[in-house]
Amino acid sequence: MTRALSKSLLLVTALSLPLAAKSVDLTFDDAVDTVNDAYVVEIDPTGAQGTGVLNSFVRIQQTGPGTTESGFNTDGTFFYDEKAGNFTHSITLGQIPLVSCANIPTCTGTDSYLEFILDNNENVNALISLDEMEVWVTTTGSPTQSVPGSGSEWDTLLWDLDGSVVGSDGDSEILMDYSLNSGSGQGDMVIYVPYSGAFGPDTFITLWSVFGGSNYDPPTDWGRDAGFEEWAIRVCDLQVECEDPDLPDVPEPSTMLLMGGSLLGLALFRRRKNNA
């Protein structure tokens, strides 16, 4: 299938989508919801901002006609609206933070989740929808089969926003508002995808997503109209539990002991100096 034909079919499909079975509303501060066994959190991180702060693995921007945009991370051919550069490339399972339920807002249980961060940059209309998201195990970091699931390179579907793998919500969408956390480079949403740990750390993970095709009722302009959307991950040790992205780093126990020892030594030094 040619790129032009793929994009035409995608546009026709987006325009003919029925109302989503579930609309996850992230258009207000600190919103938290679940969709097909995943947790979705609106975030407003503090600290440095700007493009390049996130460890991006796919940047998507449609600059032509139409309101939708789509793509997936790859080291190879761009079939959709992926942007070239260091912001679009393959990733492996071992690079993705694995977060325990205890570190996810409202989560209960003992399961672990793969963490993906989305940076939304629709700085004109501000509103945009995420209409499709699929997390795949692929046999290569450079798929040549352009349609997710269309061939042997697309090996295993780990999670689907539309509920074809797990969950009972069915066809779903996520609604976002850029104005809650303007600027690029930090992220606006975190999605925690359930993961059972069946694959090795060198397994290629490919994330497919479609934006701007919502038929949310009442109708609102959820289409793309300005900047790019960008999926990213945080840097963590190989499949080691990570802290919540909104929380400050907590010193390791050994670090705290060293700090305590230093403070105690300083106190004794000052006491001796005062007694001299």
Image (spheres, rainbow, N blue to C red):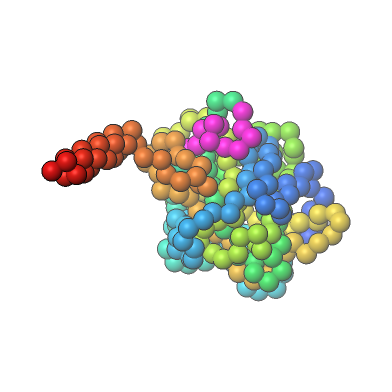
Q: Is residue 252 magenta?
A: no
> Is 244 left, or right, of 181 in this rendering?
left
Position of residue 85 measured from the top left corner of the image (x, y, whole percent): 44, 66
Q: To which quarter of the image does residue 211 belong? A: bottom right
Q: To which quarter of the image does residue 27 belong? A: bottom right
Residue shown at the point (45%, 49%) measured from the top left: 234
Look at the image and give the residue range highlighted in magenta: 98-108
Q: How many marks?
A: 0
Q: Is residue 230 above or below residue 247?
A: below
Position of residue 225 measured from the top left corner of the image (x, y, whole percent): 68, 70
Position of residue 182 measured from the top left corner of the image (x, y, whole percent): 60, 64
Q: Is residue 88 above or below residue 242?
A: below
Q: Is residue 99 magenta?
A: yes
Tell me, yes or no, if residue 26 can be seen here: yes
Could you tell me which quadrant the C terminus lies in?
Answer: top left
Tell me, yes or no, if residue 153 can be seen here: no
Q: Residue furthest top?
A: 110
Could you tell me which quadrant the N terminus lies in?
Answer: bottom right
Residue shown at the point (54%, 51%) measured from the top left: 117
Residue shown at the point (53%, 36%) measured from the top left: 103
> Is 253 left, or right, of 146 in this rendering?
left
Position of residue 178 measured from the top left corner of the image (x, y, whole percent): 65, 62
Q: Is residue 264 above or below residue 187?
A: above
Q: Is residue 128 above or below residue 64?
A: above
